[in-house]
Image (cartoon, helix red, strand yellow):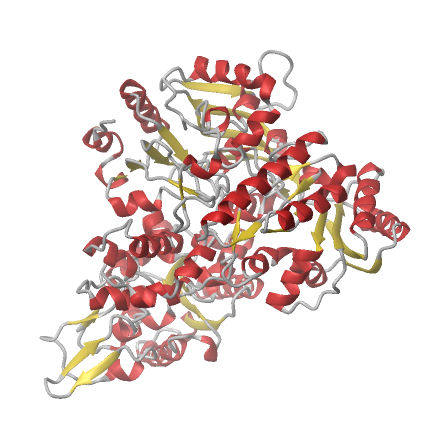
Amino acid sequence: MEFNRLRKWGNELNICIRCGYCYEHCPLYKVSNWEIDTPRGRLLLAYGLLTGEVEPSTYVAEKLFQCFYCKNCSKSCSAKVSPTDIFTDVRADLMESGFEVQGTTVRNAEKLCIACERCVSVCKSEALSMDMENMRVLVDKVKCKGCGVCVAECPVGAMSQKEGFGVSKKELSAKIESSLRSMNGIPKVIIFCCDWSIYPGLRLSRMELTGAENTSGIIVTVCAGRIDPGLILDTFYQGAWGMMIACCPLDECEHDGNYRAQERCALVERLLGVLGVEPQRLKLEHFATGEAQKLKNAVDSFVSEIASLGPI
Amino acid sequence: MEIDVERLKEIVGEKNVRDNIADLYVYGSDSSVHEANPSVVVRPETIEEVQEIVRYANAELIPVIARGAGSGASGHTVPIDGGIVMDLKRINRILAIRPRDILCKVEPGVVWDDLNRALQPYGLWFPSAPESGRIATIGGAIANNGSGVRAIKYGTMRDYVLGMKVVLANGDLVTLGADTRAQASGYQLDRLIVGSEGTLGIIVEATLLLRHLPKFRAMGMAKFNKLEDAGETISDIVASEVTPSLLELVDDIAITALNKTLNMNLPQVEAIVVYECDGRLKEAVNYDMETIKEVCEKHNAFGIEMGSDAKEMERIYSGRKKLFAALSRYREGFVCTSLADDMAVPSSKIAECARKIHEIGERNHVVMNAYGHCGIGLLHTKILMEATRKEQWENARRAVEEVYDYVRSVGGTTSGEHGIAISKAPSWKKEKADSLQMMKAIKMALDPNNILNPHKLMDAPDDWVTATKLRYPVEL
């Protein structure tokens, strides 16, 4: 099998010292805890494919198609290797050889799709296009970064991502439920955190959150753009007193997920008003990487604001 | 070697066993130059599961290699003969934090930095975390006797382990040490386990001594036109009444690398010394900083910078922190390998050792620089070379041998921090020649079937280059 695109990364794969620092913040590793799901593990698979020590297979392809492109791995690489660029090229090589798997990419259910093209218009990675002849949306699995913005945007539920990575609507809903259930006698507050900017900051601030960790359910969503109005309403329906969406500063989101989250929040705030619920129970805040103190302050003040409002 | 994978699945559950080639390939590597696939990977979640696995392996004579984060640089977790790699990252609870006893109890899979995050609200910390503390597990760090940049003041893992629970090769669980700092005579078996690299038992719980977080820190940087002046400075600081919390050397090759690859615009001098002091009183910290500054000035240092706020300290330390990335990009086609990377020499020999390292690198057509925790006599080096060329490995082999011959000749030791495992075993065996039999006797007594991390330390192959397949695409 030819790995022409991957081959050009041969030197970078040698430069990688395999220290493993890349997996400290990897959201996929956090879910499975297997080393094959770390960036280092995927780089090793790519290396094994090049040397022939690992045979291409559906299993291997599935692993290499799993990445949310949060790039926390690149940021923490001690040898300044860019794992995500390598994953993109190995995906293209695997596709060419007939290994087309879903991984973390999105899938369009053609039977449900109404060809409204809203998904195409919100995809910043240009991974979605309209096949005008057959009136269907095509997904470029090499370009798709798995941000989930299109999944949240689709009005008929035709776009989806596989479960098992902790970010599908069903999984997020289950996390909300279990977080809320564990909060007894304290303000029931859900904080959605994007992985791109917030997660490392969250880790740095985690223990300083003056008990906020015990008084709020912090849920990592990978990108705020995957939170749709239904999920926000569901959070309140499940009994949350308040909900905060923590996302990147406006022009810093690779997927424009923060703009989408802002639009959706505005919509839900109006709905909450109509329903007689205080709109301030829903809040969207922007944080840059490493703004741990700002995150801590924002969470603390939001939790105390919601505490004074009490349950809905 | 026949492994009953179904039996292992009965012990830890089907979802915690993997034996497909892709997973095995991933678990066959760490941060060293070595690689070798295990036969199966298991992830126990309880001490009982660890015991069951070890009992099974002992009965069937199957190697068991305990693995934490796999961040080791000498091949500690590379299973030379295959066997069972036991991933302990799921046994990761902090069992107790007892500020009044100034200790904590943790399971082996707890990540070093996570422990420190948990200790922070109590004003405590577990020193002295290495850079790899972001992923390195406490179990792995104990097995390797790890340390970090602040070891000069805070010591190494061995100074902090009060006790532990260990699963022996026959599956028995033993409790070693006590919850006290004072422990008198009798064999200190807990200390024996620290640094045993998984060859004597599997650590499943540890009781660790803690320290108070220092309230103040200040950092300084001094430049030297002559490496020897930097060496004299280091010796004088170490011999002085001041105990800095960090004392690092950065040599001219490292400075070139930082300037060339990261445009850091550092002056092209022969050496930079970075130092830090910490403590409870700002005045006391500043007094110590001034004393060190005077020592630096006495030895012709110039351009001394000092700072005590977080941003200033980050700027001062940024060169040292980014050094690894810079070395990785030093020359097109070269890679940065962890070979002869952490020898220690008496403090008075630091400058001489750095010079030797340069000479040996040049003579053997590889690039070697010197930097590191010189305050404890520890020098890091990396061998930068074209890893795909066969002759470069001959050169590296010679360079490593020559460096270690020198280190031993001045009373130094093969590894001050990263451990022995495979890569450093040849020199270490020469260094410990008259105690190897004693070690073998201990190993035989505790692990008669040689199932725990075999072929490491005194049992490692004599030639590190051919001990395993190398991780680079090169035909030897």
Residue B328 lies left or right of residue A131; in this view the side is right
Residue A121 sits in quarter: bottom left
Which residue does the image show at 59% across and 26% down from the upper left? B430
Where is residue B45? Give x, y as percent: 34, 35
**Is B210 placed left or right of B87 in the picture?**
right
Direction from residue A145 to residue A62 in the image, left or right: left
Give the residue displayed 60% in from the left and 23% down from the top. Answer: B432
Marks counted in the figure total 0
Is residue A236 among what the camera can see?
Answer: no
Indicate whether B373 appears above or below A127: above
| Quarter occupied by residue A306 | bottom left
Residue B280's image quarter? Answer: top right
Relative to A285, A67 lies left or right: left
The residue at the point 54 percent across, 27 percent down is: B194
Which residue occupies the extreme bottom position in the image?
A132
Q: Nearer the viewer, residue B67 or B91?
A: B67
Q: Which quarter of the image is occupied by the N terminus of chain B?
A: top left
Which image quarter is the C terminus of chain B in?
Answer: top left
Task: From the top left corner, tell me how far across and down residue B219 is, in percent.
Answer: 75, 54
Q: Position of residue B202 (x, y in %)?
A: 43, 27
- Residue A279's spot in the image, x, y percent? 40, 75
In the rendered image, the vertical position of residue B289 relative to residue A293, given as above or below: above
Q: Nearer the viewer, residue B344 or B375?
A: B344
For this rendering, which residue is in front, A38 or B29? Answer: B29
Q: Is residue A90 above or below residue B106?
A: below
Q: Can residue A305 be seen in this snapshot?
A: yes
